Image (cartoon, helix red, strand yellow):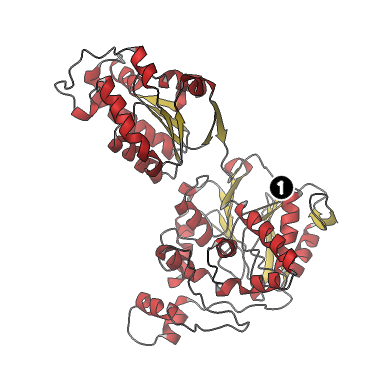
């Protein structure tokens, strides 16, 4: 059996004593990655089997697990983990640090019984030791495992692996899997490119300015772009929507990724397009209509292939990239230092929308930028999402979205040189949305609260349109309420 485990995971070995959990851990994991109660007892009092030390050992175990997760380290908890409350405490701790939790279950009752009950003579309660820390008789542990098995899949584990025979346990192969965001081995040099939004003419001009050359590619039809000195382009998201050549832009970026001359992260507009095509009953969001119109202009057979490839392309984009040994981070809307190199829904929302907890992203563009003023990380963070007139470094972060689709510039940051290059937009292809302050003062001149006013505006069945006929954001049927609220300001 192949057991795949993310590189930053918390692993729970679940099963009664005597099923080989500790031997399994010793065979497959580094000793420094494994945390067990006997190990903690030995650290506390030099006696791994002294049950009177269990209380202190459990506290030390919890502290050590929390510290390792805070550092983003792979951690294995070698205990019975048969109590629901104990598992939930560990799951809660892992969520705090955005670590996936993998359960490896040892359902081997015969092996447990054959091993014997070395502690069978001990009473079920020992003075000075809480009930939940005493050692249960083997049959009670087996009964606890039997009760837990049907619901483990609903408890919040990232994956659950079950060994039901000793052969499955002994023949298991552990595969530690890199997170999609982990590209630390890529050391550059890089050319990081801001939000393109379908401005393919400007993108081609910028690539030429940076020294990239157009050439044929075997991996897909057409051409790609390659730098003669081996530089890698890094796109910070939002390559789709709004501009005049959306599919051309997508195919150019895709060809460079296939040719390994570029990397890219997902932007909120890519996420919208993906959700549209994955929805059971798609209802086009106003902000993706331009992309849908370009696809509709193709013949039916080509449309199906385009949609399939586009969905696969977006699925393959990470929500952020950690590059150059952790010294460089690319994320569409930026990323706080405590979320870099991690993977969770909160990390994704922060990377794509700029604030993982904002209920109304457009309430204030300052909310998107709050993390920038608080950033104290070691890595340089390069991002876009919120257009600025000029790129500048602030607290080791730099915004390179200079609003090309709105008539501004398409900007690239050369790393490690830290030099910016840009081309001017040929024209304004879309009208930038107004700020929250303008929205409230111009469209809702009454004295209602800004949040209530914004909710009512979003409920307008005929929202305002911009110069290109693009509507003010609506709702997507496949979003949760909180996701809809977070997403409305990013149309």
Q: Position of residue 149 (x, y in %)?
A: 36, 35
Residue shown at the point (45%, 38%) measured from the top left: 71
Q: Is residue 243 visible?
A: yes
The image quadrant that residue 10 belongs to is top left
Dot 1 alpha-carbon crowd within 10 angstroms: few under 14, some 14 to 19, many 20 or more:
some
Dividing the image into 4 quarters, which one contains the N terminus?
A: top right
The image quadrant that residue 11 belongs to is top left
362 shown above or below 142 = below
The image quadrant that residue 367 belongs to is bottom left
Q: Position of residue 6 (x, y in %)?
A: 52, 38
Q: Position of residue 212 (x, y in %)?
A: 80, 56
Taking the view exactly as shown, the residue that stands out farthest to the right is: 216
368 shown above or below 55 = below
Q: Position of residue 165 (x, y in %)?
A: 46, 22
141 shown above or below 459 = above
Taking the view exactly as shown, the residue that stands out farthest to the left is: 127
Residue shown at the point (56%, 42%) measured from the top left: 179
Residue shown at the point (70%, 45%) measured from the top left: 188
Residue shown at the point (39%, 19%) measured from the top left: 19
Instruction: Kindly state the secondary structure of the residue where label 1 is placed.
Output: loop
* Pointer 1 residue: 189
């Amino acid at each position: 059996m192949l057991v795949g485990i993310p590189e930053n995971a918390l692993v729970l070995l679940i099963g009664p004593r005597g099923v080989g959990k500790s031997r399994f851990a010793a065979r497959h994991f580094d000793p420094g990655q494994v945390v067990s109660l006997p190990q903690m007892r030995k650290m506390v009092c030099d006696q791994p089997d002294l049950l009177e030390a269990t209380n202190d050992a459990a506290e030390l175990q919890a502290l050590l697990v929390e510290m390792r997760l805070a550092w983003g380290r792979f951690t294995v908890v070698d205990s019975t983990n048969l109590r629901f409350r104990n598992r939930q405490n560990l799951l809660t701790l892992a969520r705090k640090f955005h670590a996936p939790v993998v359960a490896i279950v040892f359902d081997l009752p015969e092996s447990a019984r054959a091993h014997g009950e070395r502690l069978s003579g001990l009473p079920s309660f020992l003075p000075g030791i809480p009930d939940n820390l005493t050692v249960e008789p083997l049959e009670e542990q087996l009964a606890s495992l039997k009760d837990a098995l049907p619901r483990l899949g609903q408890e919040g584990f990232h994956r659950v692996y079950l060994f039901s025979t000793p052969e499955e346990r002994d023949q298991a192969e552990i595969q530690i899997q890199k997170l999609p965001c982990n590209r630390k081995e890529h050391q550059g040099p890089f050319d990081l490119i801001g939000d393109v939004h379908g401005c393919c003419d400007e993108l081609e001009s910028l690539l030429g300015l940076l020294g990239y050359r157009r050439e044929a590619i075997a991996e897909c039809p057409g051409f790609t772009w390659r730098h003669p000195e081996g530089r890698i382009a890094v796109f910070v998201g939002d390559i789709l929507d709004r501009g005049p050549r959306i599919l051309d832009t997508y195919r150019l970026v895709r060809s460079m990724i296939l040719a390994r001359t570029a990397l890219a992260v997902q932007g909120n507009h890519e996420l919208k397009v993906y959700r549209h095509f994955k929805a059971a009953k798609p209802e086009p969001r106003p902000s993706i209509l331009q992309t849908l119109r370009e696809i509709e202009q193709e013949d039916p057979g080509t449309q199906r292939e385009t949609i399939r490839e586009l969905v696969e392309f977006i699925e393959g984009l990470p929500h952020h990239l950690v590059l150059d040994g952790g010294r460089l981070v690319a994320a569409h809307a930026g990323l706080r230092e405590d979320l870099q190199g991690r993977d969770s829904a909160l990390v994704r929302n922060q990377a794509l929308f700029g604030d993982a907890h904002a209920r109304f992203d457009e309430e204030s563009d300052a909310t998107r930028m709050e993390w920038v003023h608080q950033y104290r990380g070691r890595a340089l963070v390069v991002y876009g999402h919120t257009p600025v007139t000029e790129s500048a470094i602030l607290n080791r972060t730099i915004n390179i979205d200079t609003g090309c689709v709105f008539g501004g510039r398409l900007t690239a940051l050369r790393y490690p040189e830290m030099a910016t290059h840009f081309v001017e937009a040929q024209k304004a292809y879309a009208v930038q949305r107004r700020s929250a302050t303008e929205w409230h003062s111009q469209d809702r001149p009454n004295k209602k609260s800004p949040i209530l006013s914004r909710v009512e505006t979003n409920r307008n069945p005929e929202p305002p349109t911009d110069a290109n006929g693009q509507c003010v954001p609506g709702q997507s049927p496949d979003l949760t309420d909180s996701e809809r609220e977070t997403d409305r300001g990013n149309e």
